[in-house]
Amino acid sequence: MIQKFFSYLIPIKIYKKKSARSKTIEVTWANGELVLDSENTNYSYGSLQRILRYGLRNIGYDEILKMDHILVLGVAGGSVIKTLVDEIEFKGKITGVEIDSEMIQIANQYFDLDKIKQLNLVIDDAFEFVLKTKDQYNLIIVDVFEDTNMPNFLFEKFFLDRICILLKSNGYILFNTMILDEAHNVRNRKYISELDPELFTSKMLPRIEVHNELIIIKKN
């Protein structure tokens, strides 16, 4: 508890480990809360939790409470899952997909992710998982990063088409992206342009926490 108190004055690092995928994984007390960071960006809690909470608010908490199955691609420390369960009080099923088993160990140890009974955690590559799954989902949250890098497959039309197929009618995709230069702006606009406007509606929420842009897609 003393670490939590002093973290209002200065961040206190309590865990650090080298990671093949994220360079470095760190758990830090900052402003009275535990946050999970990679070498160059926040992975869970802190600013990332605020970003995805903003996206969920934009969809509407009442809308989310009516859902029965949510898919989270890219779990890290599980902050968006905690938002769903603790703040929104979502009671349905959550499937979380995370490629890095070390990340899940940290999420369980420091953030009690394994205590969420409605959560099914899957250690798998997000691309491979969406190819294999037979389920359909009311909401698919895409939050896949390796440090500040976003894998190219996330923006390929094949992947977009596949996750759109996995959506139930009136379902949503909440896609967290990072904008670091004009090429990323062009990339995101191209991504939106590949949707069929008769089947989907979309909107972009730009410049959240400086470098993040959320894309929200709804299946009509």
Image (tube, rainbow, N blue to C red):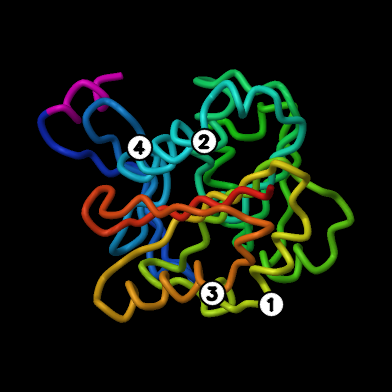
Q: Secondary structure at mark 4?
A: helix
Q: Is residue 79 above or below residue 84?
A: below
Q: CA distance from mark 3 to mark 4?
A: 23 Å
Q: Which mark is residue 158?
A: 1
Real-space Cα separation, disc 3 to disc 2, in angstroms: 22 Å
Q: Which residues are magenta?
A: 1-8
Prevailing secondary structure of the magenta residues: helix
Q: Nearer the viewer, residue 133 or 38?
A: 133
Q: CA distance from mark 1 to mark 4?
A: 30 Å
Q: Which residue is mark 2?
A: 59
Question: Which-is-in-front pick, marks 3 and 4?
Answer: 3
Residue 44: numbered disc: none
Near mark 1 (Cα within 10 A), the count class, few <14, some 14-19 or many ≥20, is: few
Q: Which residue is mark 4?
A: 50
Marks 2 and 1 close (CB-CB < 8 Å) = no
Q: Is residue 117 magenta?
A: no
Q: Earlier in the sequence, mark 3 or mark 4?
A: 4
Residue 92, how many percent across, how many down? 74, 27
Q: Nearer the viewer, mark 1 or mark 4?
A: 1
Quarter of the image for residue 115 reads top right
* Secondary element at tag 2: helix
Rendered image quadrant of residue 12: top left
Q: Say which amino acid is labelled 4.
A: Arg
- Name the side, left or right, on which 33 lies relative to 219: left
Amino acid type of disc 1? Phe
The secondary element bearing badge 1 is classed as helix
Residue drawn at x 67%, y 54% is: 97
| Residue type of the residue flagged with mark 2 | Ile
Give the residue pinned by disc 3. Answer: 155
- Percent x, y of residue 14: 33, 42
Looking at marks 2 and 4 on the same chain, the residue that comes earlier in the sequence is marked by 4
Query: What whole-number distance in Å separates the C-alpha atoms at marks 2 and 4?
Result: 14 Å
